[in-house]
Amino acid sequence: MTQVSSPDAALDVLGRVFGYEAFRGDQAEIIRHVIGGGDALVLMPTGGGKSLCYQVPALVRAGTGVVVSPLIALMQDQVDALAANGVRAEFLNSTQSLDERRRVEAALLAGEVDLLYLAPERLAVESTVALLDRAPIALFAIDEAHCVAQWGHDFRPDYLRLSMLHERWPSVPRIALTATATPQTHAEIAHRLQLEDARHFVASFDRPNIQYRIVPKEQPHKQLLELIRTEHPGAAGIVYCLSRASVEKTAELLVSNGVPALPYHAGLPAEVRAANQARFLREDGLVMVATIAFGMGIDKPDVRFVAHLDLPKSVEGYYQETGRAGRDGLPSTAWLAYGLQDVVQQRRMIDQSEGDLAHRRRLSSHLDAMLALCETAGCRRVQLLAYFGQPSSPCGNCDTCLSPPETWDGTVPAQKLLSTIVRLKRERNQTFGAGHIIDILRGKQTPRAQQNGHEALATWGIGADLSDQQWRGVVRQLLAQGLLATQGDYGILTLTDASAQVLSGDRSVSLRTEPERVTRQASKTKAAAVDLEPAQRELFEALRSWRAAQAREQGVPAYVVFGDATLRAIATARPSTLGELAGISGVGQKKLDTYGEQVLAIVGGGTPARGPAVSSFEPSAQELADQEEPPFFFDEEPPPEDWR
Ligand code: ADP
Ligand code: ZN
């Protein structure tokens, strides 16, 4: 396909194919640069609109846009979403039959493919390279480019070979894209993909529609249920847990409490994982309970909350995972419950991890940054963005902004605690975890205290003025500030070099009070329907159920038909002609042709003609066969049981 590139060609494609009126942020500049043949490295948060940055140039430039993506399991959905807009997209991967692959190859050589999706492993195969040599290539897009970063959290060795694209096709522009953006990762991507001379586009990493909240972990399952019931009833969400066992347990708990939920972790059979992922994408209002094996590349735009029941290992990981909420720009929640045992568990995992000292140090500094985020008394968003090297001011939409914690002078309690640890060691040669140390401070008679005669310690009962919970907060914060350390499987508390300064009174300790609980106004309907008049809401719901039926019939995710934002706009504008409908954001030519009449019929109050109703929500056997497990997992073995 040869198309003449004019200044308006990109804008024309945007409107005609995708149904959008204007580019967002850097999109216009990135697209202009790539259409002109330039290389680009694009750092943009999830939901920022990265896909259009390569899809539009691929449609404007002559030849096929080749997209390198690590996510075989999602290629079908990506291609379906493009096909729904009339784009000729294909993929080549191991899930296909030989015939199917031949068909795609022939289409490619005939110039009938606008976008071709490939996994990086496939580019390592000489026959693929030879095939691409025979087809005109518009550009190479390297999606999820942070997979090339060796010390990042998603490293994929096959990405290292992608530097060969430049050598093999020096005149074809390359655009690498990622939502991960610490300055180190940024530099590593540029270096490894030989994109030092490319233009770098770094967008703001802020996700203003996500409300960040971090709460002390008390009864995590109860807290989670309350979050879902009061703030996000009936909404789609993701709950992250560290271990497979807690994934299973949490999913069961949700289901038994009337919240539709599915488990996902690397220990499940591939077909169960694929089926659960397909249901999460296709059905409305499911909660996925998962380890971090789940989520990369999940395009579902209406995930309303991401909850963490365990502490993530790094701020980068946390930001990636929470970023899966609210891609459609509507209000969403990122909620994390963390407690003392999380810190102990993570430290232990670092101590036991393979790799050299430098590697363990790196893991440790990632954890420290995560803890600092949890214990900050300042704005969460300011701290998050600062981590990505982007200065900002307090956001007004995180728990610490909405209910600022007070800080208090915790020097004396810190001294009491540290001194108890020192005395036990010096006088008795004993060490204990936080639970027993707190019991001593509070003067709590327990069998262990009696057996050991701990009433005789000088610090016995000197901390009775603080509650158990307050003391746990003190321990957590001292750990986060590096004034206390834990050791071994039972989370034994020990001093650090800095502890001595506190004991000697040379250093004071500032602590934050446990914050007031922040909850969003309970909403009776899904967030997307918020602010709609009753009649608009009714229409919105009618459109949603029509969309659900369409998606089921076609075996595609609902958002491939239309996104919530587009349905909202239709419900508000009530178009009565195809021309009016075409003016709505997200309605391109192909969707207008396919669905226009049906949508107008619903707006007009009628019921559109429909295919046969599909009785089951389960994906068909064929759909299951189409899914392939991602070839990699970063999963955790279940950590040993609680230490307390
Ligand atoms: P990313 O890949 O950066 O996470 P996507 O490319 O999936 O983000 O885009 C996020 C959402 O924003 C999608 O629903 C997409 O269609 C929409 N979008 C992107 N660019 C525009 C635009 N210029 N106008 C309107 N909607 C857009
Ligand atoms: Zn804030």
Image (cartoon, rainbow, N blue to C red):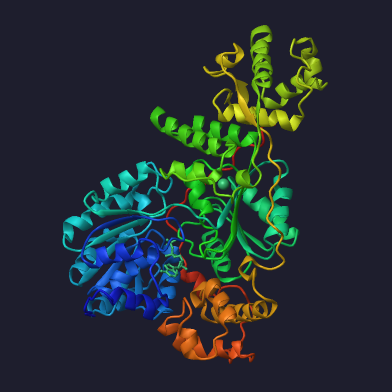
What is the residue that sits farthest to the front in this orientation?
393
| Placement of the N terminus among the 4 image quadrants | bottom left
Residue 489 in sight in this render: no
**As rendered, which of 571 and 230 lies closer to the eye?**
571
**As rendered, which of 341 and 604 lies closer to the eye?**
604
Q: Is residue 598 above or below residue 562?
A: below
Q: Who's the residue at 51% across and 80% down the image? A: 554
For this view, does 449 lie left or right of residue 406? right
Q: Which of the 4 image quarters holds residue 168?
A: bottom left
Q: In this figure, what is the number of numbered marks?
A: 0
Q: Position of residue 163 (x, y in %)?
A: 24, 52
Q: Position of residue 580 (x, y in %)?
A: 49, 87
Q: Position of residue 330 (x, y in %)?
A: 56, 64
Q: Who's the residue at 43% across and 30% down the image? A: 361
**As rendered, which of 343 and 336 lies closer to the eye?**
336
Q: Who's the residue at 64% across and 17% down the image? A: 418
Q: Position of residue 478 (x, y in %)?
A: 60, 26
Q: Who's the residue at 74% across and 13% down the image? A: 459
| Placement of the C terminus among the 4 image quadrants | top right
Residue 169 in sight in this render: yes
What is the residue that sits farthest to the top in this orientation?
427
Q: Is residue 151 above or below residue 415?
A: below
